[in-house]
Image (cartoon, rainbow, N blue to C red):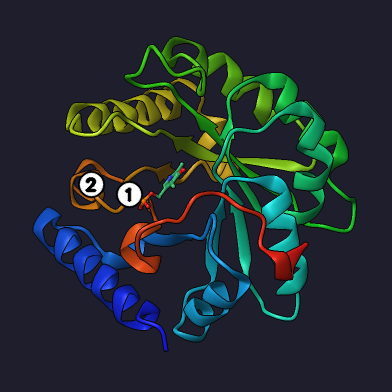
């Protein structure tokens, strides 16, 4: 027995209500189910309830799940920090990477994307409000990074992502404004499909949707409280 279908329905209801309150079309906000630390069985249960896009933080854990569930038509997003020595696996197995914060990572993903796969969708992670965090490019560096990433083959620059500190709704507005600024300064971006603002989690998805999020990343509200990160015996 699992509550996942019920939880998913509740999250869709929250997204619908937030879109209504913000005067936005619910079809313009995608739900990414964050399945880090969850079993392949939990992912399959969410898929049976209609969920197709899943977000993962740890490359090896994700690759195990992706292989276990390769019979299902799932879309896999890497949302956790990415080290250079993991880019080949990510280029081979994922559909999206939200955590690109430097050119070297994008260049490796570009070079390593298998020729028989569609371009890998990338978001630039921006360190919008947390000086202590090492993840994310500085907002003032985002434009130069976007221009360089856009020029790479095998990848498609789709938008911006941030993980603001809890209780800082201003950061959500700032990320949305940064995306608008990049679109204005780099005309070719819209044609390239720069349509994504990846922000909002279980606790702040309403505020994120009000600020313009197009993809909310929700874990706990779908799968329950997380257990600590362990490799699952059935998946190794
Ligand atoms: C874990 C995680 C989420 C989901 O957080 P919840 O609070 O469980 O919804 C979203 N984004 C990133 C980058 C994460 O690491």
Name the residue carrying label 1: 201
- Counting other residues with Cα less than 10 Å from the Cα at mark 1, is it few (<14), some (14-19), or many (20 or more)? many
> For the point 54% across and 56% down, which residue is it?
37
| CB under 8 Å between discs 1 and 2 | yes
Name the residue carrying label 2: 204
Q: Residue furthest bottom?
A: 1
Q: Position of residue 84 (x, y in %)?
A: 77, 27
- Apparent side of residue 121 relative to residue 26 in the rendered image (left or right): right
- Apparent side of residue 111 relative to residue 195 in the rendered image (left or right): right
Query: Dot 2 lies on which element?
Result: loop
Q: Position of residue 52 (x, y in %)?
A: 53, 72
Is label 2's Cβ within 8 Å of ligand 1? no
Q: Is residue 53 above or below residue 91?
A: below
Q: Quadrant of the N terminus?
A: bottom left
Query: Dot 1 lies on which element?
Result: loop
Is label 1's Cβ within 8 Å of ligand 1? yes
Q: Quadrant of residue 13?
A: bottom left
> For the point 70% across and 74% down, which residue is it?
69
Q: Position of residue 221 (x, y in %)?
A: 31, 62
């Amino acid at each position: 027995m699992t509550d996942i279908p019920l939880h998913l329905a509740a999250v869709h209801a929250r997204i619908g209500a937030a879109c209504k309150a913000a005067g936005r079309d619910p079809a313009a906000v995608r739900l990414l189910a964050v399945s880090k630390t969850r079993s392949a069985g939990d992912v399959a249960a969410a898929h049976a309830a209609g969920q197709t896009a899943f977000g993962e933080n740890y490359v090896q854990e994700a690759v195990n799940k992706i292989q276990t569930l390769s019979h299902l038509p799932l879309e896999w997003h890497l949302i956790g920090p990415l080290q250079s020595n993991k880019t080949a696996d990510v280029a081979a197995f994922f559909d999206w990477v939200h955590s690109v914060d430097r050119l070297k990572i994008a260049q490796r993903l570009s070079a390593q994307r298998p020729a028989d796969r569609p371009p890998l969708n990338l978001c630039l992670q921006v360190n919008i409000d947390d000086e202590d965090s090492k993840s994310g490019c500085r907002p003032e560096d985002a434009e130069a990074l976007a221009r360089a990433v856009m020029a790479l083959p095998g990848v498609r620059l789709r938008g911006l992502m941030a993980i603001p500190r809890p209780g800082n709704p201003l950061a959500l507005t700032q990320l949305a404004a940064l995306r608008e600024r990049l679109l204005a300064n780099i005309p070719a971006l819209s044609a390239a499909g720069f349509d994504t603002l990846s922000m909002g989690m279980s606790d702040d998805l309403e505020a994120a949707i009000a600020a313009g999020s197009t993809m909310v990343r929700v874990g706990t509200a779908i799968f329950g409280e997380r257990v600590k990160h362990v490799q699952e015996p059935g998946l190794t």
